[in-house]
Amino acid sequence: MIVPAGTVLCRLADMADGATKGFVLGEGEWPLRGLLVRLGDGVQGYLNHCPHAGHRLNFHPDNFLTPDGALIVCRSHGALFDKASGHCIDGPCRGESLRALPVGVQDGEVRLTGPLDIDQLVTRYW
Ligand code: FES
């Protein structure tokens, strides 16, 4: 399944600056799970897939951050990721990175800026 560029994921106003939000694209047992991070007027998007052991990063919807909100944390074994780059700065996958997704803000909406091949991504990362 190809999800086309321009697909709306949420409204920018739905996220506080610095906050995260999870999203799901596709259907069935193996949808694509992702997360968004708002940084000022921009947004970064990543696969919700830890490079350490392939687990989902979060236990609770939309909650991907350390208690101080500074970093993305994987709840399985504590890997810490920079919000802006997705780079792992500490933990068992130090030096690796979250898989970035093509997202951007247009007219106040967070959208895919390129198509996503869900089947290809799920086969490769899950
Ligand atoms: S699966 Fe994320 S730190 Fe182990």
Image (cartoon, rainbow, N blue to C red):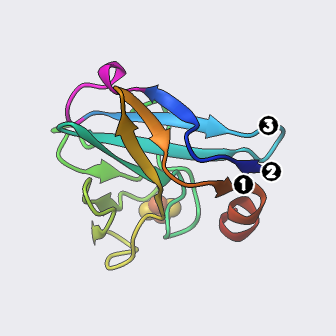
Q: Amino acid at mark 3?
A: Glu
How many C-alpha atoms fall within 10 Å of the one at disc 2: few (<14), some, or many (≥20)? Answer: few
Q: Is residue 84 above or below residue 5?
A: below
Label 2 close to label 1 by CB (< 8 Å): yes
Left or right placement of residue 23 versus residue 83 in this view: right
Q: Nearer the viewer, residue 113 or 57?
A: 113
Coordinates of residue 111 in the picture (x, y in percent)? 48, 38
Foreground of the two, 11 or 57: 11
Q: Position of residue 16 (x, y in %)?
A: 24, 25
Q: Is residue 78 above or below residue 5?
A: below
Observer-nearest of 48 and 67: 48
Instruction: Say which residue appears at 62% left-offset and 54% top-offset.
Output: 115
Q: Mark 1 is on which residue type?
A: Ile
Magenta residues span: 11-18
Of the image marks 2 and 3, the number of the one nearer the N terminus: 2
Q: CA distance from mark 2 to mark 3?
A: 10 Å
Q: Position of residue 87 (x, y in %)?
A: 31, 68
**Local crowd at mark 3 within 10 Å, few (<14), some, or many (≥20)?**
few
Identify residue for label 3.
27
Does the magenta segment cover residue 12?
yes
Front: mark 2 or 3: 2
Q: Which mark is residue 3?
A: none
Q: Is residue 22 left or right of residue 71?
A: right
Image height check: is 45 above or below 126?
above
Q: CA distance from mark 2 to mark 1?
A: 6 Å
CA separation in Å, label 3 and label 1: 10 Å
| Res 88 quadrant in image | bottom left
Whether 94 is drawn above or below 43: the answer is: below
Labels 2 & 3 near each other (Cβ < 8 A): no
**What residue occupies the far right of the structure in this picture?**
28
Residue 1, labelled with which disc? 2
> What residue sits right under mark 1 in the picture?
118
